[in-house]
Image (spheres, grey):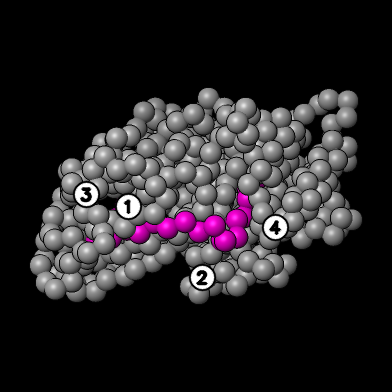
Amino acid sequence: MLSTAAAAQPTKAAFKFDFGPGKASPGYQQVLPTAVYSPTTGCGFDFGTTVSGADRGGKDALKGDFVTSDKPFYFSVDLPEGNYNVTVTLGDAQGASSTSLRAESRRLLLQKAETTPGKFITQTFTVNIKSRQITPTTTVQLKPRELNKLDWDNKLTLEFNGVHTCLNALEITPAPTAVTVFLAGNSTVVNQDDEPWAAWGQMIPRFFKPGVAIANHAESGLSLGSFLGSKRLDKVLSVMKPGDYLFIEFGHNDQKEKGPNDGAYNSYTERLRHFVSEARKKGGLPVIVTSTSRRSFGPDGKIVNSLSDYPAAARAVAQQDNVPLIDLNAMTVKLYEAIGPEESKKAFVHYPANTYAGQTQALADDTHFNPYGAFEIAKCIVEGIKANKLGLVKFLRNDTPAFDPTHPDALASWSWLDSPRSTVVKPDGN
């Protein structure tokens, strides 16, 4: 249970937690290993995950004790909509630790942080919490698959995952002046909740310093039209402030729409311009992103365009309306061809039967990425941010190296520990 001071507290927007069974640091709320999340307490370990505690003593009450586990665990805190600075302190006075950190629906914040005995690290990230509510009478129209997504509930959930995570402290404070990068897109952009599916939108937070929050409003199966129809653009505009960004990537599902006004140079172009103009009316900064290529190799080992005129139409709108363009379609073609027709399967959801629970048949999907593929594509987005000299460049983390899609990272160097949740159900769209 939480310490007496933390139990049954009303919902608030700032917290300072000291984890472990030792003496709590002054000004911090103690969180014992037995603290289980409930709407009454408003915070605690969640989704049936458990931890143990250790107390090393010493003069530093904050770092002298911690909670730990060799399995992933979740910690949730009730929070209203907004941007928050989230600061974690990790380490063990007597042992080594290793931690990756993900927020909400597997948004990557900290890839792999290792400490030696007696060493500690403190890292801060800016995280967005979103709500379905637009006005008192209107809400985002969610798909059934979204109703249980961690991105859409009323709390911040952090996933701690590592060989030996040692969590000392957690601080959460509102960050109302942070720049928000809103993402509008489909399954190649969305925060995928479950292994082994992933998209670049949930990997991109890892590359930003505090001061930038990624608000991912993408969803699987959406086109520009269905994003509008489900009131997602209305939602984005309702919380956008001057200086925020709107990254727009569509095409995969738009090309399947066959109405009399549909097509790359008809409704698709018109709607892209609508997104751009509406963002600009709010003082926002739109960025057009061409669609990721599908893994569609021809007999010559080169990618065959499966997206018709949609990438070209997006380029034309960007040029004609003076909108920054990240040509992700061109970059992903280079990326896949560099990896090769067979090896590139390892960037997508291609897995033999029984790799994941309940998976009785092989998975072979040439549109949706696994975490490795999504991470490589997020690096392409970072290069697009640099090439366009967006103001976001100054917020890129110092450990963000240059990336050339013709020279992708070797899969052998990739590190990813699976989150507890997995599914064999393919995301909407293709």
In the figure, residue 308 lies in which quadrant?
A: top right
In the figure, residue 91 lies in which quadrant?
A: bottom left
Instruction: Give, as a single range, the part of the protein colored magenta.
Output: 161-185
Query: Mark 2 or 4 closer to N-term?
Result: 4
The kind of secondary structure element at disc 2 is loop
- Residue 237 visible to the viewer: yes
Q: Mark 3 points at which residue?
A: 5
Residue 354: % across, % down? 36, 33
Q: Which residue is drawn at 44% across and 38% down?
A: 154
Query: Mark 4 or 1 closer to N-term?
Result: 1
| Numbered badge on residue 160 | 1
Kind of residue at disc 2: Arg
- Residue 162 magenta: yes
Q: Name the residue under label 4.
A: 242
Task: Please state if 78 lies on the left or on the right of 364 as rendered.
Answer: left
Residue 164: % across, % down? 23, 58
